[in-house]
Image (cartoon, helix red, strand yellow):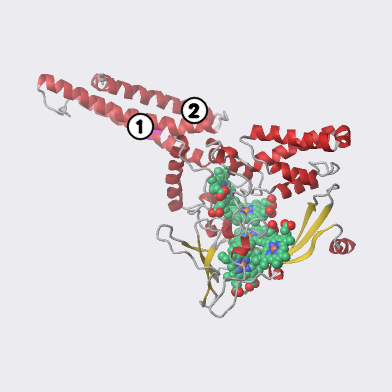
Amino acid sequence: MRRLMYYMTRHPLSLAGTTLTTASATLILIMAGMQLIGTEGSPYIGILAYLILPALFVLGLILIPIGARRANLARRNKSGKPRMPVLDFNRSSTQRTLAVVLLLTMVNVIILALATYKGVEVMDSTEFCGTACHSVMAPEYTTYIDSPHARVACVECHIGSGAGWYAKSKLSGAWQVVSTTFDLYPRPIPTPVHNLRPARETCEECHWPTKFHGDKLDVRTRFASDEANTETKTVLVLRVGGVDGEEAHGIHWHVDPRIQVRYRSDPSRETIYEVELTDEDGAVTTFEPGEPAPETADEPLEWRVMDCVDCHNRPTHIYGQPATEIDDAIAEGRLDRALPYLKREGVRILRASYDSHEAARAGIREELVSFYRDQQPETWGAHETSVLQAADVLGEIWTTNVFPTMNVTWNTYPNHIGHEVSDGCFRCHDEEHESASGAVISQDCFGCHALLAMEEEEPEILAMIAAE
Ligand code: HEC
Ligand code: HEC
Ligand code: HEC
Ligand code: HEC
Ligand code: HEC
């Protein structure tokens, strides 16, 4: 026993190792204890307790034998004794030392197992993914907490169940921790995510193709850029479709498991070249693009099987557009429609760029106030609080969609669901992708939706529905 103590302390390195190991083990146990009795910590406590301290713990364990060996070498050089310590198992002191070493090893293994288990749990938590990396994940986290999937953990979509993907993503997760710490990540974080787990194994755990059917009536409220911010309605019937028994139709026809659509694109997936359709009988049709793919050796084009994410690339990290964000805010009563030209001015002001969220809030307030004060003095006199409130709401819209520290601005992350802001569906449905027999991928408006009203003040169709 005394010999063990001697080994653990006689070289400065061993001494440092012993101190490090003991101290970090004590801290890990205290923090685990605190969590057990329910003291809620921030994700930083979790990172410290289960990621950083265990690393120090292992470092200490490594230092002890290194120090001991150095000390041994030094002693041997002096006395000419054998290089390795002679272990005589007949000696009771050796037996005791061995027992203590075994016992300590077991304790160490338990502490490390606990720390590893908890460490994985911490890394899987949404708080860790979303906030530990702070400014890096701010755009993704901010858009996520306000989305239909706010209750779905990051790992449900980014990792999903299954050991293979789990190990893979943990490795890339470890790399992300390192690159965040040392500021190596790209700004903005690139999209698409090329190694995202196939949607069949994530999205389809909760939504499956046979679950959608029929059409969906979609009424969108818009406000014009005139003085009155005139309210209009756009009415669409989206042919959501899906798989109904033997038949698949409408928009979700693409995810019928009996067929497959594959395409080749540039790495951003914004420009789609060949599209290949394999139908239920196995017959293959290739639609060649209007412009052939550039063949460059250093940027190989990827073939990809189309899945949910090719249309729903923004199911949760949903970035708005100035116009539609203002429409929503007026419709919900957060912005006062009585303020003349609010829509027009709001869109103009939101498009300006600022270096930080603080600068944006201040600059937006300044711009809006000076517009009403200088050009609409009556409104300014009568509705000053409304104008100031509107400035705050515009500031909120800007800061939840634009992130200067990450170089994320309007439309950095295009949404592929429609065709208004990015090409979306029209990346393929452009009437230019053509098969050998001359068929094209259709741009017939009616195939995807019936457009019953387009920015109309009083759409007849809504009056008809209301009258029924
Ligand atoms: C409902 C599923 C879902 C959830 C939950 C989710 N993501 Fe995503 N995430 C996606 C999809 C889909 C993409 C875009 C994939 C593509 O286009 O290749 C994406 C992309 C990203 C990107 C790349 C940048 C971008 O916007 O394209 C990051 C970083 C990211 N997610 C982080 C997170 C974090 C952090 C969380 C938890 C706070 C989270 N995600 C939760 C589905 C999800
Ligand atoms: C853990 C379960 C879960 C997973 C995984 C999941 N979703 Fe969802 N999703 C939901 C729930 C629950 C809702 C309904 C939310 C609501 O009604 O507010 C929803 C809503 C939606 C909607 C409708 C949104 C809207 O505006 O009404 C779409 C589209 C969608 N999910 C697509 C996806 C895609 C694409 C993926 C994979 C990248 C995915 N989901 C993964 C549970 C999930
Ligand atoms: C070809 C593009 C495309 C593909 C592929 C696709 N979707 Fe959709 N999906 C849409 C469109 C378009 C809508 C209607 C959007 C809207 O309501 O604004 C929609 C609507 C939905 C909705 C809401 C349904 C409703 O009735 O409100 C869910 C949930 C959904 N999709 C999930 C999925 C899942 C899961 C997959 C993969 C199995 C998938 N989608 C594949 C384009 C697609
Ligand atoms: C990667 C290319 C691609 C993209 C992106 C794409 N489609 Fe398609 N879509 C196809 C192909 C290929 C067909 C089959 C064309 C044919 O058979 O003539 C098709 C067919 C359709 C059909 C007809 C389905 C049926 O009942 O036969 C609809 C509806 C449709 N797409 C809607 C959409 C919508 C909505 C989007 C965007 C949200 C979209 N598509 C995006 C490739 C694509
Ligand atoms: C390949 C399918 C497809 C075709 C073809 C198509 N659209 Fe659309 N369109 C969509 C989808 C999907 C949406 C809904 C997107 C969303 O959820 O925001 C949409 C939305 C719209 C909107 C509403 C925009 C808004 O939010 O105010 C208008 C207007 C529109 N389409 C017009 C047209 C017209 C006109 C044509 C014919 C030239 C056409 N579309 C052809 C898929 C299609």
**Which SS type dominates the magenta stretch?**
helix
Q: Which residue is labeled 2 in the image?
A: 31
Three-letter amino acid code at disc 2?
Met
Q: Which residues are magenta?
A: 106-111
Identify which residue is drawn at 11% across, 19% down.
Answer: 79
Q: Quadrant of the C terminus?
A: bottom right
Ligand 1 under 8 Å from disc 2 Cβ: no
Residue 168, placed above or below residue 45 = below
Identify which residue is drawn at 58% across, 56% down.
Answer: 203
Res 424 quadrant in image: bottom right
Q: Could you say which is closer to the camera, residue 451 or residue 256? A: 451
In percent of width and height, residue 320 lies at: 67, 48
In percent of width and height, residue 183 lies at: 47, 36
Q: Which residue is labeled 1 in the image?
A: 58
Identify which residue is drawn at 29% across, 31% down.
Answer: 102
Identify the residue at the far front of this view: 374
Residue 279, placed above or below residue 92 = below
The number of discs equals: 2
In magenta stretch: residue 403 = no
